[in-house]
Image (spheres, coloured by chain):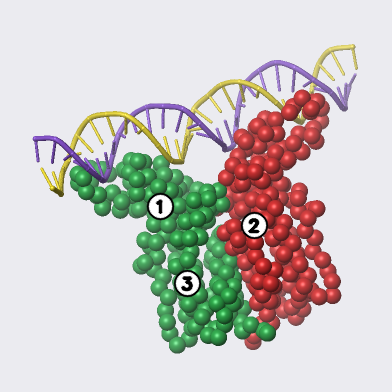
Chain colours: A green, B red, C purple, D yellow
DNA sequence: CATAGTCGTTACGCACCGTTACGACAATTG
DNA sequence: CAATTGTCGTAACGGTGCGTAACGACTATG
């Protein structure tokens, strides 16, 4: 593997980081979150552990990068004249994206990691989730145009929880109709 | 530690299993899910690893037992004439129960474990969750008396996800008012 | 041509994993 | 009153992964 990767001296070698991210993705796909270790990634990428730790100090960093890298080319929120349908589309696409068993495994690994590593928990809450939650809040805001920020935030948590619950139970193969029903409940007009 | 625990010969020694469960609980409380290892439990309990593995073949088994053991004396679903308030009470009590940082840590560890161990995932879905979900379904059924089983099930998932999302983000210290709002949304009459 | 930064290799000490072998022990069985 | 049976603690095993350190090879920079 390292044969096809000539050294670049004192400049960072982009081929290395690509090889590492590729290896991480492949391992997640083939062996799931269970087989994901820094050792395995290093070996598969033909890289050294110190190199990985230089750019991704934490397993969480690497997992987030793998996730991010694929999300860019996969899930984009639409904006039609039916915001309710936009949210449904986005959710279905996201779950589909997760079920490719690459990003989904990465996310699962990240959440699991956060349960035993305070640093990973911080990364999850302060770096990973906020931009994603704001996307959801925006879509919810278009649906419930006259709801308060707290009201939107609460429903975003409901949406998040519903998605997590499915992902973490390996039950993301849900009928689109049922997802739609759940979203209808989450976006039901507040009764008061 | 083993001084105060005379051997009982060919009969199982109840003091041993109690010591192990106590040790597991203490470690979860003091060090969280991160510091929870079979080695640490064995050492603290003054027991041998083989003894632990004899009765709890999996870490998930031990975690579930720790959780179960405390739940019995903590959270009981009420049944007043206001089923909506019953569900709120139950949820608040459950979150309070989790935030004691014993059962909550155990649950978090169990979910994390399930992300990398198929056996733990099976145990979680087939043994741990069903009785708890049926409790929720029952309460939801009293609120939405004329809803279909699928409808109830979907809302149970929403409730579950909302709770998990809070637990797994270390955000179970929520205002009772907000919990009530979320439950109001989950139990909103279906619009169709 | 010296410097600085990147990279792979190797190896370290540490923590856990899940299992095995063994001997001490006491309740039981006959 | 032995022999049996199952429980228990101890010690140790090979294996895996962790995160870090030391080293030498390399090349763009200045």
Category of crowding for the residue at label 2, using alpha-carbon neighbours closer than 10 angstroms: few (below 14), some (14–19), many (at least 20): few
Nearest to viewer (mark 3 / mark 1): 3
Disc 1 target residue: A62
Which comes sooner in the sequence, label 3 or label 1?
Answer: 1
Q: Residue at x 80, y 53 (%)?
A: B73
Secondary element type, mark 1: helix
Q: Chain of mark 2?
A: B
User: Does any portion of residue B155 appear in the rendered image?
Assistant: no
The dot on residue A13 is: none
Could you say where residue C27 lies in the image, as x and y percent from the top left?
87, 27
Instruction: Sort mark 3 into few (<14), some (14-19) or many (20+) by Cα contacts within 10 Å.
Output: few
Q: Is the residue at mark 1 from the same chain as the one at mark 2?
A: no
Q: Position of residue A40 (x, y in %)?
A: 40, 43
Q: Which mark is residue B125?
A: 2
**In the picture, residue C30 is in which quadrant?**
top right
Please tell me the numbered disc located at residue A134.
3
């Amino acid at each position: 593997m390292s044969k096809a990767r000539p050294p670049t001296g004192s400049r960072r070698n982009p081929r290395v980081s690509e090889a590492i991210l590729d290896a991480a993705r492949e391992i997640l796909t083939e062996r799931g979150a269970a087989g994901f270790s820094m050792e395995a990634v290093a070996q598969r990428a033909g890289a050294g552990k110190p190199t990985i730790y230089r750019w991704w100090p934490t397993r969480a960093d690497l997992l987030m990068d793998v996730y991010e890298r694929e999300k860019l080319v996969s899930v984009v929120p639409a904006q039609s004249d039916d915001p309710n349908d936009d949210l449904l589309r986005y959710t279905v696409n996201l779950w589909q994206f997760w079920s490719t068993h690459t990003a989904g495994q990465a996310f699962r690994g990240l959440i699991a990691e956060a349960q035993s590593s305070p640093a990973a928990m911080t990364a999850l809450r302060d770096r990973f989730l906020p931009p994603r939650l704001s996307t959801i809040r925006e879509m919810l805001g278009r649906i419930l145009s006259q709801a308060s920020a707290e009201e939107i935030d609460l429903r975003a948590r409901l949406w998040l929880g519903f998605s997590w619950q499915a992902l973490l139970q390996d039950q993301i193969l849900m009928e689109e109709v049922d997802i739609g029903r759940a979203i209808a409940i989450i976006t039901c007009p507040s009764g008061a």
